[in-house]
Image (cartoon, rainbow, N blue to C red):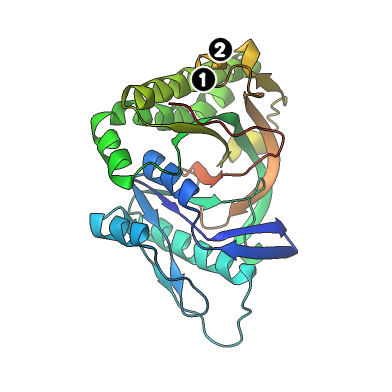
Amino acid sequence: MRGIVAGVEYGGSVNNLRIYGGLNPEKLRQYILYWDKIDYPENNIIGWELTPDEEFLIKCGVMERTMCSFFGKVSLGADTLLDVQMAAFKKHCEEKDGIWSIAQPTKEIILPERESILKENIQVELYNCLPVPDIDTPFETILNFKERRNSELEAFRNLLDDMYKDILSHPDAEFAKRKSIENIENALINIDRTLKESKIKRVFKNMKAELNVNTLIDAGFKLVAGTVLGQNMGLGKLSGIVGVGISAINITQALSQTPRCLSPEETDYAYLFYAKKEIQRVVVP
């Protein structure tokens, strides 16, 4: 079972976070499609009323709400919500009730300093090529699709699981990186094809996956950065991509905040869903 700890919408810099509202309904459709369980943690400090859609997901068993209680003097800002998200994530890590990750609406992962360390990890970025149901797609439609075509979604998630091992263990890391990009590309094309066959309208979004790797990078491994543009790959096979904007997949090594509670075996710990103004939003039939 794969779960994701979702949070409310916020933005700004690490020292100046601003809350924009509750769960983003468009991102919620991404979580439903690519994860088995969503934890939308609640707390005793600040919160929002559940929408009918969110109540439906709880009744279906797709969403749960971990209660995180705080006592004493607590701020009423986005920092508190980061603490709530981290508390729920730590609980799942301790209980080992599946493989859990964190979802955030920013391009860089932002974690409470006392709960994280800064270290080099591998990052996978998808620009304008992650197919997700558009905002008008009913949740029932997405859940039915997952029941029928789960193999394509599993193939994509398994690629992220195994990719970093292939790159770090291969004698030619750059060759392994290019092969991983090709495999991810083909998996995305297959997901888009099955969504189209199911007559589900799609949008193509950005996503960054943060992958926790310890020993080999600490031993001196270096991965050269470099983005592969869609026109050089075949992402034009994705419906609606051609002539619309740049699509790309990037695998690189970079410093990022990493939860202290992660064990060495846990890899993909965060997924970032962010917008880029220069990438055009597309809806395809």
- The answer to the question of whether label 2 and label 1 lie on touching residues, with beta carbons closer than 8 A, is yes
Residue 136 position (above or below residue 13): above
In the drawing, does residue 240 fall left or right of residue 155? right
Q: Residue at x 52, y 85 (%)?
A: 71
- The answer to whether one can see residue 111 in this image is yes
- The answer to whether one can see residue 172 in this image is no
- Identify residue type, mark 2: Gly
Q: For the N terminus, which image quadrant?
A: top left
Q: Position of residue 127 (x, y in %)?
A: 62, 30
Q: Position of residue 175 (x, y in %)?
A: 61, 13
Q: Quadrant for residue 39, please give it.
A: bottom left
Residue to which mark 1 is pinned: 185
In the drawing, does residue 33 fall left or right of residue 237? left
Between the residue at mark 2 and the residue at mark 1, the CA separation in whole angstroms equals: 8 Å
Residue to which mark 2 is pinned: 234
- Identify residue type, mark 1: Glu
Q: Earlier in the sequence, mark 2 or mark 1?
A: 1
Q: For the C terminus, which image quadrant?
A: top left
- Mark 1 surroundings: few (<14), some (14-19) or many (≥20) residues within 10 A: many
Q: Quadrant for residue 138, please give it.
A: top left
Q: How many numbered discs sit on the rendered protein?
A: 2
